[in-house]
Image (cartoon, rainbow, N blue to C red):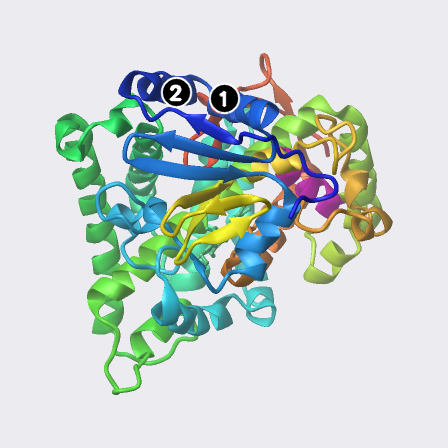
């Protein structure tokens, strides 16, 4: 059925099934993923059926179609090869962890994991988050410039490992960051002409990727070994929950499965928040009015910015939260996610065959003037309670939606708001040059590094 406000064209098929056309299309994606996908929507409407040799996908941006996939028909839309394929999917690095698994196995693992990230439990991580952020700020004393990207990445990794695994991994941080870069490049490669080649032909990339997997294995298996050596008592963190879990037959989870869950949490749980923070600093540097309002809120609630915030304080600082939400609208770091139907199904008036990848491009939903007037403008008041109540449902998806919604979203929001408030209490961050460009791979990153000038506030 046609949606009232949707743009469906009579022919929504982008036919790149010939090899040469496909190479051209992959080249365009590699050069400019966002611009290329936008041009598809402009030409073909809200649903685009993209045919490439041996691989079709349906690309979506309309909130109602997204709702159908993530919620309405979540019973038949499962994670597709982007996640589950052992060679070309995230499975290669994250195995069958929570992000990639499907069916009753996923349900069981989600039930097991969710309590560690429940909002009551997350409140218990607050002091740890304050400690990690303070440690980062102590390192900034006397500095005039800071490598924001490295600092955000290091601190979010520290927070996730200390809260969920009760372990500190300062020495491993550069290795984890290196592995993360390799995974990002791997995703970029799948969206480039190289993605059309058989995997075995990409030898240098395969070597790098296998080394990165080895690094992750080494770090994670060591954490598991060390915890086992301490005895399997419940220390209340996610790792002890995973170690203590028993299935219906009383069997513990295998080490491989525990490894997959841990690597998933490591990677899904820090880079996303770090990138959200990076973009937030860029946006604040570009929008002095919003920055001023943030400082006013901080000064009002935190005694001129001199007091460390408590959890209660954060609740009294709605504008800082609106800044994070608006930053995630403009830069939804997890800007695309996908599924496949287990049976033929209609989306709008397009027939999607069983097994076809269906890709939600939330970046373009978030930048669509139908749901977000003047979409490129940074305006945190879009997320004031009154305005939020009038937002189009499923036009805002920084954490996905439906049963597979991000399990760490409460954790991430508290962490991001806290880091924003603590850092902005002490410093203004200024861009040293032009605004950085977007690098959309697995997540939306800042292209190159992000060195910013520090100006002390107090
Ligand atoms: C700003 C920060 C974050 C963003 C933008 C984000 C975004 C997302 C999105 C969009 C999904 C859904 C993917 C899909 O539907 O295929 C997701 C899933 C997930 N996220 Fe996050 N995430 C963030 C932080 C976190 C944190 C802090 C953790 C863990 C501590 C985490 C762990 C996960 C896991 C395990 C899944 C898979 C859940 C499932 O399928 O059951 N994320 N995240």
Would you name the residue on which mark 1 appears?
A: 36
Residue 458, compared with residue 133, is above or below; it is above
Horizontal and vertical percent position of residue 338: 45, 46
Horizontal and vertical percent position of residue 42: 60, 24
Would you name the residue on which mark 2 appears?
A: 25
Horizontal and vertical percent position of residue 29: 42, 22
Viewer-nearest residue: 211 or 285: 211
Viewer-nearest residue: 55 or 379: 55
> CA separation, marks 1 and 2?
8 Å
Residue drawn at x 46%, y 47% as measured from the top left: 352
Residue 234, compared with residue 314, is above or below; it is below
Horizontal and vertical percent position of residue 105: 34, 70
Q: Are marks 1 and 2 in contact (CB under 8 Å)?
A: yes
Dominant secondary structure of the magenta stretch?
Answer: helix
Residue 331 appears anywhere in the view: no
Q: Which span of residues is magenta-colored?
A: 320-333
């Amino acid at each position: 059925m046609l949606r009232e406000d949707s743009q469906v064209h009579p022919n929504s098929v982008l036919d790149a099934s010939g090899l040469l056309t496909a190479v051209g299309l992959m080249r365009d994606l590699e050069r400019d993923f966002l611009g290329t996908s936008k041009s598809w929507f402009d030409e073909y409407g809200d649903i685009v059926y993209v045919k490439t040799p041996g691989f079709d996908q349906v690309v979506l941006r309309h909130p109602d179609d997204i709702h159908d996939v993530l919620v309405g028909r979540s019973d038949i839309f499962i994670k597709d090869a982007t996640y589950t394929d052992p060679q070309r999917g995230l499975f290669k690095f994250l195995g069958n962890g929570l992000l990639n698994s499907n069916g009753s196995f996923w349900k069981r693992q989600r039930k097991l994991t969710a309590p560690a990230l429940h909002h009551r439990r997350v409140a218990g991580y607050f002091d740890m988050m304050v400690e990690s952020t303070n440690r980062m700020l102590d390192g900034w004393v006397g500095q005039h410039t800071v490598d924001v990207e490295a600092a955000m990445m290091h601190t979010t990794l520290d927070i996730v490992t200390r809260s969920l695994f009760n372990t500190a991994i300062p020495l491993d941080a550069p290795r984890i960051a290196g592995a993360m870069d390799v995974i990002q490049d791997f995703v970029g490669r799948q969206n480039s002409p190289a993605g059309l080649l058989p995997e075995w032909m990409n030898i240098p990339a395969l070597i790098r990727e296998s080394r990165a997997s080895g690094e992750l294995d080494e770090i994670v298996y060591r954490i598991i070994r060390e915890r086992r050596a301490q005895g399997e008592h419940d220390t209340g963190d996610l790792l002890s929950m995973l170690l203590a879990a028993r299935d219906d037959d009383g069997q513990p989870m295998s080490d491989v499965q525990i490894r997959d869950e841990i690597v998933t949490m490591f990677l899904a749980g820090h880079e996303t928040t770090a990138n959200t923070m990076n973009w937030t600093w860029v946006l604040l540097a570009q929008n002095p009015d919003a920055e001023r309002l943030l400082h006013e809120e901080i000064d009002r609630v935190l005694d001129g910015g001199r007091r460390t915030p408590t959890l209660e304080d954060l609740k009294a600082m709605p504008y800082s939260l609106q800044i994070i939400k608006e930053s995630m609208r403009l830069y939804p770091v997890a800007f695309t996610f996908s599924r496949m139907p287990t049976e033929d199904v209609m989306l709008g008036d397009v027939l999607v065959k069983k097994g076809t990848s269906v890709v939600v491009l939330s970046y373009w939903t978030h930048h669509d003037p139908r749901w977000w007037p003047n979409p490129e403008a940074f305006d945190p008041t879009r997320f004031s309670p009154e305005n939020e109540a009038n937002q189009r449902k499923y036009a805002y998806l920084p954490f996905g939606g439906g049963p597979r919604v991000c399990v760490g979203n409460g954790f991430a929001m508290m962490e991001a708001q806290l880091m924003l408030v603590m850092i902005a209490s002490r410093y203004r961050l200024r861009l040293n040059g032009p605004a950085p460009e977007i690098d959309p791979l697995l997540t939306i990153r800042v292209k190159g590094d992000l060195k910013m000038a520090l100006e002390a506030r107090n």
